[in-house]
Amino acid sequence: MRIDVISIFPAYLQALDLSLIGKARTGGLLRLDVHDLRDFTTDRHRTVDDTPYGGGAGMVMKPEPWAQALTAVLDEDRAPAEDAVVETRPVLVIPSPAGEVFRQSTAHELAEAEHLVFACGRYEGIDERVAQWAEERYTVRPLSIGDYVLNGGEVATLAMVEAIVRLIPGVIGNPGSLTEESHADGLLEYPMYTKPASWRGLDVPEVLLSGDHGRIARWRHEQQLARTADRRPDLLPPTV
Ligand code: 6GU
C-alpha cells in the first residue's frame, strides 16, 4: 500500500515513524510520504489560506496549492502491474468534522486500496471545489473520526492511518488479535487479565482459571454483551 499525507504541519505526522507503522514501512509493506502543502505554493509568502466568500469567522484554504499537491502525488503513480488482480482508484480522504463517520468497516474498506492520500485541512476547511475537482481522478471520502472538533485533520489522519495499516496482511504478527478485538464482531471486547491471579485483594474471575474452554468462551461472550449494553447500547441490534 502507498499512503501520502499532505499537511501544513508535517511534524504532526512524525509519529508514523514509530512502532507498528514504522515497521511496516521499513519492512516494505507500506510506502508512506508526508508532504508540506506550502511546497506547492508559488508566492513569496507561501500563502495557503484566504478569507471566506459570504463572510464569517476564520480562513479557508485556497484551492490551487491543493490541486498542485494532489496532482504531484498522482503523477508518481505507476502503471498498474500486469498481474494486478483488482485495479483500485486512488482514494482521497478529506478529514473533516463534517464528514461521514470513520468506523472499523471503513478501515477495512480503505485497507483494500492501493493508494490513499490524506488532505489535512486547517482553519475552517478547504475550498469546496477541491473535492469536486478531485472527483475526476480520485474516489473522494470526506471522513470524521467522531462528534467533536479538532483544530485540523492531522490528528484524525494519525488515527485513521493506524486503524487502516494494522489491517494490511503481515503488519500484525498474530492475525488472531484482529478477530478478537473490539468491533471485530460488532461488540466491545471482553475484559482481559494477566498474572498474578490475586492482586491487591482483586481476583481474576474464577472461570478463566478453570481450563474449561467452552465455559470461558460463553463467559467472554456474556461479558461482551453486558459491556456493550452498558457502554455502547447503540451498537446492539434492535430488539423487536
Ligand atoms: Cl476528521 N477533522 C477535524 N478537524 N475535526 C474532527 C474530525 C476531523 N473528526 C472529528 N473532529
Image: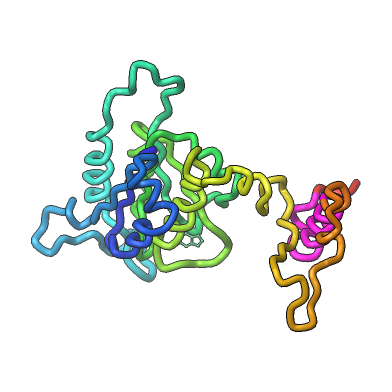
The residue located at (53%, 57%) in the rendering is 145
Q: Compared with residue 141, is residue 6 higher up or lower down, i.e. above or below?
A: below
x then y, percent, for residue 187: 74, 52
Task: Name, please, the residue furthest toward the right.
Answer: 240
The residue located at (37%, 62%) in the rendering is 15
Examine the rendering and report whether any part of residue 45 can be seen. Answer: yes
Task: Name, please, the residue furthest toward the top.
Answer: 82
Q: What secondary structure is the stretch in magenta mostly built from?
A: helix
Report whether 73 appears left or right of 110: left
The residue located at (38%, 68%) in the rendering is 56
Viewer-proximal residue among 155 and 51? 155
- Residue 219 part of the magenta-drawn span: yes
The residue located at (27%, 61%) in the rendering is 8
Report whether 179 appears left or right of 202: left
Quarter of the image for residue 204 reads bottom right
Q: Compared with residue 73, is residue 101 higher up or lower down, i.e. above or below?
A: below
Region rendered in magenta: 217-236
